Image: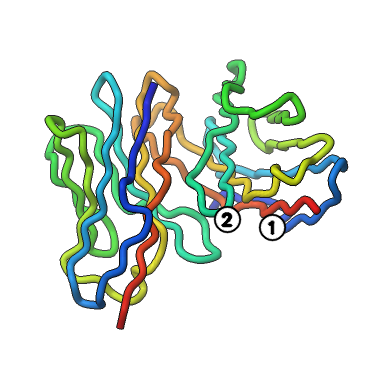
Amino acid sequence: AQSVTQPDIHITVSEGASLELRCNYSYGATPYLFWYVQSPGQGLQLLLKYFSGDTLVQGIKGFEAEFKRSQSSFNLRKPSVHWSDAAEYFCAVGARAAGNKLTFGGGTRVLVKP
Amino acid sequence: GAGVSQSPSNKVTEKGKDVELRCDPISGHTALYWYRQSLGQGLEFLIYFQGNSAPDKSGLPSDRFSAERTGGSVSTLTIQRTQQEDSAVYLCASSLMGANTGELFFGEGSRLTVL
């Protein structure tokens, strides 16, 4: 069975500082990996995804993530956060064999200090 | 609209009543999912429909929960005899299977409050 762990429940970062959100997954085969963002009162929006190929993927809003098979990780990064990045971020793992059903982590809430 | 549409956006009900939540997926998407997001929690998978195949109901928490998808499009999630622990945001998502994308497109959710 698939599982996802996001070790950090909350992260506070200053505007302009860098951000890294951790995600560890468990899955026996090559997974599909996703990061979604949920802004207050809004639905989930896909930031980026990894299926295969280049392990460093670029997403929207200046985010990127790196797939590290040896560490079963898919950490999300942004070099310089903006106040509008305050939101909750969810990592998810899926697999074709599971019908593209996604298993989500518990989320990391990001607070941005001015 | 072009996105996943859910209704109602908010529902307040009394314990013991039945509720129905509706999801209208993106046109042409063959896969439809229901997730539940409780306060401060991640997303919990409930049920998944793919075309005419039997749905994957493995995430439904009890037999009070059921869902159907008519004509391969609109889906209704029904919760019978609601309990306070059913209070949550119920999210619907759809996906275009066969495109090897795996991306789920989410609606804004239906917030259910059981008093």
Which residue, given by chain and number where applicable, does mark 2 sit on? B108
**Crowd class of label 1 (few under 14; some 14 to 19; many from 20; radius 10 Å):** some
Three-letter code, disc 2: Glu
Residues A91 and A111: in front is A111
Q: What residue do we see at 75% from left, 46% from top?
A: B84
The N terminus of chain A, quarter of image: top left
Q: Relative to A78, is B89 above or below?
A: above
Q: Relative to B17, is B62 above or below?
A: above
Residues B25 and B78: in front is B78
Q: Relative to B104, is B68 above or below?
A: above
Q: Relative to B60, is B106 above or below?
A: below
Q: What residue do we see at 68% from left, 38% from top?
A: B74
> What SS does tag 1 mark?
loop
- Image spot of residue A105 (x, y percent): 39, 42
> What SS does tag 2 mark?
loop
The answer to whether tags 1 and 2 share a subunit is yes
Residue B70: tell me if it is visible.
no
- Image spot of residue B40 (x, y percent): 52, 53
Give the image quarter of residue A99.
top left
Which chain does the numbered disc 2 sit on? B
Q: What residue do we see at 36% from left, 69% from top?
A: A111
Q: Earlier in the sequence, mark 1 or mark 2?
A: 1
Which residue, given by chain and number where applicable, does mark 1 sit on? B9
Give the image quarter of residue B70.
top right
- Image spot of residue B21 (x, y percent): 73, 44
Residue B98: tell me if it is visible.
yes
- Image spot of residue A44 (x, y percent): 47, 53
